[in-house]
Image: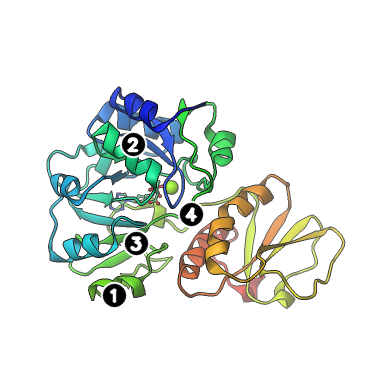
Amino acid sequence: MQYINEHEAAIHLKEGEVVALPTETVYGLAANALDPVAARKIFDIKGRPLIDPLIVHVHSLEQAQELAFFNQQASLCAQALWPGPLTLILPKKPIVSDIITANQGTVALRLPNNAIFRQVLELAQCPLAAPSANPFSYISPTRTSHVEESLGDKIPYIVDGGPCTFGIESTILDLSGREPKILRPGPITAQMIEEKTGIRTNVLNVNEKHPIQSPGSLSKHYSPSTPLVLFECEKEVPKTERSAIVYFQKPSHVNYVSGQDVYWLTHNGSLKEAAKELFSMLRKLDKKAYKTIFFQSPPTEGIGIALNDRLYRAASKIGGFIRSEQV
Ligand code: TXA
Ligand code: MG
């Protein structure tokens, strides 16, 4: 994998190559969204099934309107919350190819708020399809080192943007059906959407199947290889050898147990800091060959709702159903 700048990235993208790029959420693996052969390369590199549609990134609302039909709610959301970590699912226009949408009538659109990604969009002069730059169903990358360690031998180019600001994938809001529905919680919360646009949304339950194919909302996704158990209260955690216990915030007193390593996501309890650290922490722990990772649920407010969603999906490997009482 070669490190390049924004200008070189735009040239390679125009020529039908794929390039890993930073966004404000996670690193994406980008290709020209109007070139089906280029877009196909993304699926091969990620090992992603062709039934899993891609998010298309645009540099302006006008460019988005060339790709999808905007109703009033969509225009409101775009005006109030773009650029930013919000993906809108809308009825697609014919110019969008079936490989992008996995043969569905809708397309996922996002106007990102990362200076590097936006500059590449401007220079390349085409919309860019970009899923997270990780092997299918593994943890999304929030640093270049994450991209390098899991796909470095398959991705030809990357632009370095440092650690991602949010550290967790965009909110996905489906506006193509009868009711606005959040398919994937993210940095833009239901509360923020309502405050900024007046639109009330339902959040897809983590165990609910959505009629639209959206593997990011599968109950098992974003998973480390090591079994992960979510807990709420420390006394629920068994004293097991070769395990890790991760607190949300640095505890005032730690009861060290032999064979059990102790970590925390934040020093000060900031949910924003926790979001930035989460995927790094999961990747780091996954390399240590623990038998189990015990992870404390973050508070379920603001971006904490999205953190719990990702941890729940990461944890769903064990018995498919995680409740703290079962720990
Ligand atoms: O923050 C993000 O959204 C990052 C950065 C790179 O932009 N991208 C990202 O893409 O997370 P990806 O492909 O890893 O996750 C996108 C999710 C997938 O679960 C996909 O199934 C869903 O969006 N999706 C895409 N198009 C859809 C559609 N038309 N209907 C329903 N879900 C869709
Ligand atoms: Mg992904």
User: Mark 2 and 1 residues: CB-CB less than 8 Å, in contact?
Assistant: no
Query: Hey, which quadrant is residue 13 in on the image?
Result: top left
Residue picked out by circle 3: 183
Residue 120's disc number? 2
**Residue 112 pos. (x, y %):** 34, 50
Element carrying mark 2: helix
Above or below residue 178? Residue 54 is above
Camera-nearest label, 2 or 1: 2
Which amino acid does the dot numbered 1 rest on?
A: Glu
N-terminal of the pair, mark 1 or mark 4, is 4
Q: Neighbour class for label 4 at 10 Å: few (<14), some, many (≥20)?
A: some
Element carrying mark 4: loop
Q: CA distance from mark 3 to mark 2?
A: 28 Å
Element carrying mark 3: strand
Q: CA distance from mark 1 to mark 4?
A: 23 Å
Which amino acid does the dot numbered 3 rest on?
A: Leu
Left or right: 61, with 210 as reference point: left
Label 3 C-beta lies within 8 Å of the nearest ligand 1 atom? yes
**Residue 322 pos. (x, y %):** 57, 67
Q: CA distance from mark 2 to mark 1?
A: 31 Å
Residue 5 in view in this figure: yes
Residue picked out by circle 1: 194
User: Mark 4 and 2 residues: CB-CB less than 8 Å, in contact?
Assistant: no
